[in-house]
Amino acid sequence: MAPLWASEVAHTTPEANHLTDTVEVDGRPTEVVDELGKPIGPTWSGRFFLGADSNGRDIMVRLLYGGRNSLLIGVLASLGTIALGLLVGLLAGYHRGWVDAALNWLMDVIWAFPVILLGVALGTALAIGGLELGPLSLEGDSLAIPILIIAVVYVPYLARPVRGRVLALREREFVEAARAQGMGAPRIVFGEIMPNLLNTVAVMLPLLVVNAILLEAALSFLGAGVQAPNASWGTMIAEGVDRIISAPHLAIVPGAMLVATVLSLAVFGEGVRKVLDPKAEVRMEH
Amino acid sequence: MGSGLARFAARRLVSMVLVLFAVSVIVFAIFNVIPGGDPAVRMAGKVPTETQIEAIREEWGFDEPVYVQYAKTMEKLFTGDLVSYFTQLNVTDEILNGAPRTFALAIGASVIWMAFAIGLGLFGAIRQGALSDRLLNALALIGIAMPVFWLGAMLSHYLGSEAGLFPSGGYVEFLDSPAEWLWHLVLPWFTLAVLFIGIYSRVLRADVIETMNEDYVRAARAKGLSERRVMLNHVLRNSLIPIVTLWGLDFGAVLGGGAILTEQVFGLQGVGQYAADSIGQFDVPAVMGVVMYGAFFIVVFNTLVDIAYAALDPRIRLEGDGR
């Protein structure tokens, strides 16, 4: 939870470098980055709790800010996936016919791409020029770009189960009753059918967040996700791997945070699934 | 049922061609239409010169209508005429050079994950509820939670550079030295396999537990067959179907996903590392080539897997008719 309050907890900013500073370690003053450019490891106290990176930036602080980006992207991208997936699934399932056929086919085509390949394609293409789509205009290094990419990539994973549920729901009595009352299609779809999809969505949400966080990390590791000067756990691992021989803690710490976050979300998701929908079959890839 | 199979295959092939076309349009749109700014500038890479940009605009037809641009892009991709403006190397050649390494990585990893998943899945099902089973479940969850590039970096650093048990990276051609080839691939194989060992062993475990309660399994036991034969010949044979199906879906995804990350960490210099290096440089033609060829390979591979299944299992053909 701490990443949410990063700016209150931290003694410094994630970009500030303390190359020439010294801190007390075991009662002795120690340089944050020594003459050979080797950053200090964890001090386990106060400043530089988890050590510094080679620019003398405090890892604990960067971890908090980077974690904030990772979690933010994970949650917002998942909400985006849910909005888009619900829209596609509801349209396809309710209208059937050619709308369904066309949307289904589009989902099949997106599904044909492995998520990383599609994410990499979008990430590389958008990182340089940014995005200008109608009124929407984003800079190449905006955090909104990875959010958008991840949201789009996972749409078929939600749209498919939603469509299946809608196909079954639209034949149920309460929908027929609504139709008999003369309700219009939008009111039936959003007022009558959508509330019945809450279970499906609640079961998918933790899984979507897990996959979004992992995909963000993978894309950022490759350089197609979060762009400098922003950081995320993915970019921190990438920086750490480059210096793994002299300072392994740079890669270990963000990776361990990532694993801990993903594990706890996965266990939480498992619990939600058991309570709400014991028979749900959900499959994701990352 | 020969004609039924032929009809199924023909239909799958037609839909494959349609999907390939759509994939090509989407890749074209992603790189040349959707992003803001001048596509010629994006193609040119990080530090383009004005003349370079002008030449690229001419070559790709960026002043012309979209369909002309699409045609020119496809022509470049499929006549092997795609050149990186960053390295000046031919993209198709680079991909073909790297392909054997990527396949060696993906095939070896899938052999490992299948073997471990079957062993651990069976073990978990037999010891259902015991401490060892619950421990395996927890391990599987951790395996699924670990990002493949982080696991790879840790293994390569601690078992490779620090302990010296394995080479810390690189690739040796099989024909140069089979032993060295194997030695260099052990860690990448395991790194790539861990996630799938976690998933597959849990799927197999659940399926084995379900199958063990089937009537025909009880009948086999009642006949007095040994527990070993019941498990291997009756239970496992049936429970293998779901994970083999999963494998058909995942193999393509591994080539286009996990392999990129694993190759980058271990420096295997296959297609995946070529992709990763190109992404780092924002080398658009190279990334476009990898994505297009990769997606095409996966679509064709999945179609062939489908047809192979239909040949083995007539029920799938009927299901396909219903669509």
Image: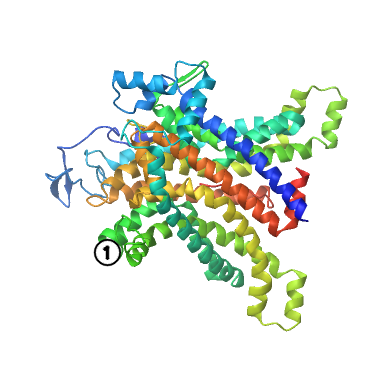
Which residue is more in the foreground, B19 or B244?
B19
- What's the residue at 60%, 54% (across, down)? B246
Secondary-structure class at tag 1: loop
Q: Where is residue A81 in the image (x, y as percent from the top left)?
A: 57, 34
- What's the residue at 44%, 33% (across, down)? A123
Asked which quadrant contains residue A126, the reply is top left
Q: Which residue lies furthest to the bottom in this view?
A: B224
Q: Residue furthest right?
A: A180
- Describe residue A205's horizontal placement relative to residue A263 as left or right: right
- Describe residue A15's horizontal placement relative to residue B204 as left or right: left
Label 1 neighbour load within 10 Å: few <14, some 14-19, many 20+: few
Which residue is more in the foreground, B179 or A280?
B179
Which residue is more in the foreground, B217 or A34?
B217
- What's the residue at 52%, 26% (across, down)? B71
Position of residue B1 relative to residue A114, above or below, is below
Q: Is residue A176 visible to us here?
A: yes
Q: Where is residue B90 in the image (x, y as percent from the top left)?
A: 37, 37
What amino acid is at disc 1? Ala
Q: Is residue A143 visible to us here?
A: no
Position of residue B273 relative to residue A228, above or below, is below
User: Label 1 belongs to which residue?
Assistant: B163
Asked which quadrant contains residue B232, the reply is bottom right
- Chain letter behind tag 1: B
> Which quadrant of the figure contains the N terminus of chain B?
bottom right
The colour scheme applied to this rendered structure is: rainbow
> Which quadrant of the figure contains the C terminus of chain B?
top right
Q: Give the number of marks.
A: 1
Q: Position of residue A259 (x, y in %)?
A: 43, 50
